[in-house]
Amino acid sequence: MNAPLPKAYKEGYADFYGRNFLVTPAVLIPRPETEAIIDIVKSLAGKPILPGVKAPTPTIAENAKILDVGTGSGCIAVTLKKELPSAQVTGVDIDRSALEIAEKNAKNHEAKVTFAKSDLLADVKETPDVLVANLPYVDKDWDWLDKAALSYEPAIALYADDHGLELIKRLIAQATERKIAHIILEADTYEHQTIQEVIPDGYELAKTSGFILYIRRMSR
């Protein structure tokens, strides 16, 4: 029996961090666990996560350059721009269909975000202060995987080789080679230990929050 069409695709939108985003089967449906990426970047910028909570000391500039790799619907990039209006936010994706959706979402939310086509960092010229990414990290061979439930979402945005870690490993290598100071990634918690093992010298796993890992360059 085929799985029913997800509600988000039926309605044409999904909620992310309190905002509605256009979604089609060209992009993943935003998940609540991904919202922790926004919280970590806001903390780096010295912004409180909840009302009444003391703001942390900022570690990035107000106009920091933020790059969202594998932007998909653009929900992360657009949300970061709305939450941090002075930041310079760029989103890249290998799929032009996804970029079209991302651009529509930026327009709908009046968010000045730059979008461009790139295979990870291959066509990215500037080095950002902060890199965020929710890349494909699903291993097709996971025995707990419900492939039917995921069948409507784009495989290019879900699955990766090397037990789900091919793209994440490549991105970490590219980002650390460029000495990007702050790297925030999403991956299944099952994969976190393996990811930690490929973090190169000069970097450390500073924090995990659910599915999210925050890797930072260590002070010299």
Image (cartoon, rainbow, N blue to C red):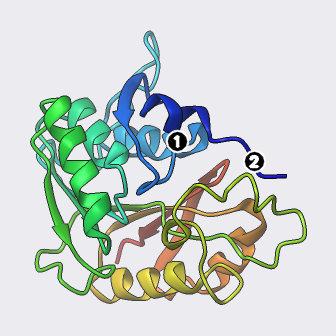
- Amino acid found under the numbered disc labelled 2: Ala
Residue at the (35%, 87%) spot, across then down: 174
Return the residue found at the far top.
52
Element carrying mark 2: loop
Residue at the (37%, 83%) spot, across then down: 176
Residue 67 in sight here: no
Is there a contact, CB below 8 Å, between mark 2 and mark 1?
Answer: no
Q: Nearer the viewer, mark 2 or mark 1?
A: 2
Query: What whole-number distance in Å separates the C-alpha atoms at marks 2 and 1?
Result: 28 Å
> Which quadrant holds the C terminus?
bottom left
Residue 177 in sight here: yes
75 lies left or right of 102: right
Q: Quadrant of residue 32?
A: top right
- Amino acid found under the numbered disc labelled 1: Ala
Q: Which mark is residue 7?
A: none
Circle 1 sits on which residue? 36
Q: Residue 61: horizontal and vertical position, in percent?
A: 17, 48
Q: Which mark is residue 3?
A: 2
Return the residue found at the far right.
143
155 lies left or right of 49: right
Q: Quadrant of residue 192?
A: bottom right
